[in-house]
Image: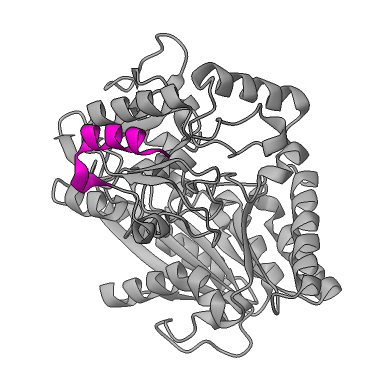
Amino acid sequence: MNTTIFQEIIDIVGPEHCSREIEELHCYSYDNSKQTFLPDAVVHPDTVEQVANLAKLANTHCIPIVARGAGSGTTGGSLPTQGGIVLSCMRLNRILEIDTDNQIAIVEPGVITGTFQKILQGHKLMYAPDPASLKFCTIGGNVAECAGGPSAIKYGVTKDSIIGLEVVLANGEVLTTGTRTEKGVVGYDLTRLFIGSEGTLGIITKIITRLLPLPEHKETFLLSSTSLQQATEFVAKILQQNILPCTLEYMDKTALQVVSDILPSRLPADIQAMLIIEIDGSRQKVEEQAEHLKRLIAAEKYCNIKQAATEDEIQEIWKARRSISPATHKISPHKTSEDVVVPRSLIPELVGFCEDLAQKLTITILTFGHAGDGNIHVNILAADNSPKEKQKAANAKMALFKKVLSMGGTLSGEHGIGITKSPYISLELNRTSITVMRQLKQLFDKNNIMNPGKIFPSEELHNGPSPV
């Protein structure tokens, strides 16, 4: 990037809100995928006008521009793989409106998800999506990836809580989608088009969220089982009994072992799997469903249930659950983390397949995740960084993907595609689907400056931006 162009960036955001210093560039060169790509500049706009002017500048000079939240993504979605400008949304962090009467809010993309949830509790409202990284991830990033979380079984994923957007397009024009109302069917549903598009179609600058009344009461249970098969089969049994948890999480034995020092009680040696089950709603309804759940489990030979007695105990349970992914580094830092989804009745088959695959390839594979909606996180842990172990991990990943698709599942439930899954997208989508998506990309971003190189394999897209 030449000095003249960088001076134009300075003129837009001010010298204190942009940088080409190598130390600053390195801070925005990586995400949770553990890959690194150095941008040419980092900018921190704080108005939609600044974002629009930056997009217009980038489009004029064919410079890649990559919107970034907290960098907590696992598939490389916010990485500047072709250099260019990283546009940090962290100064766009205002909660613009909380409309309690109509139960909506308008926020900017840099708002921290967990912070937003806490503020809403004071209004006796809730924003339902709760990704594991909620303490530091941003709502804008959640929208870009269509993040999920433990509550998806009852409340859905991010797309189910977003009713409108403001988006800056590649040419600097500002597009608004959706409405403030529950109903609205005027024209195409562009809101859903941008949710999960990973910043490849435009830069989100405002988000209209649907809010819900804060549940009156919640109870938390830990179901432990000496049989992995029985524990996973129990997921379908719970839902078949007209019990609708707000959370139904699954952890296998290896996942439990890596967080055993955080769990509120010592893990018995014979435990093979555990479920976290939460029920919320009115106190009467929760108590009725809780008793139903206890009776159901009492009839199970391999299962035992324990009800969390205090708020501290609940927090310890969730601290352990949300710590599994980083804690896997106790086994090996060479991790491939996948978030596949299968019909929830087939979770036992998928988990059994992963166990057999681990033995066949002599590699460690642990599983945990959102059993209530069939979204299982499969962590493939290579013993070291040698070519042999890397090939084992790659073979395991391909075998996993083929198995999931043969079961009517999908390759990603909430992490997106980015660059780590893009080579596999044609396993799930046929040529016509990919062609239509590429045509949409071309329509919104003819110069391919918006987060180029993501979702689609690079050789499938037209040539990227010319170097500056």
| 43 sits left or right of 59 in the view | left
Residue 443 position within the rendered picture, expressed as x and y whole percent measured from the top left:
54, 16
Question: Which residues make up the magenta segment?
Answer: 1-18
Image vertical order of residue 342 relative to residue 232, above or below: above
Which residue shows up at 57% across the image and 45% down it?
A: 418
Residue shown at 45% from the left, 20% from the top: 190
Q: Nearer the viewer, residue 456 or 355?
A: 456
Q: How is the image coloured?
A: one colour
User: To which quarter of the image does residue 376 belong?
Assistant: bottom right
- Answer whether residue 357 is magenta in the image: no
Q: Residue at x 34, y 57 (%)?
A: 24
What predominant SS class does the magenta segment belong to? helix
Question: Relative to 219, is 455 on the left or the right?
Answer: right
Which image quadrant: the N terminus?
top left
Q: Taking the image as drawn, is residue 125 in sight? A: no
Vertical comparison of 300 with 95: above or below: below
Nearer-the-camera pick, 5 or 258: 5
Q: Looking at the image, which residue sits at the far right?
A: 360
Residue 409: % across, % down: 70, 44
The front one of 386 and 327 is 386
Q: Residue furthest front?
A: 3
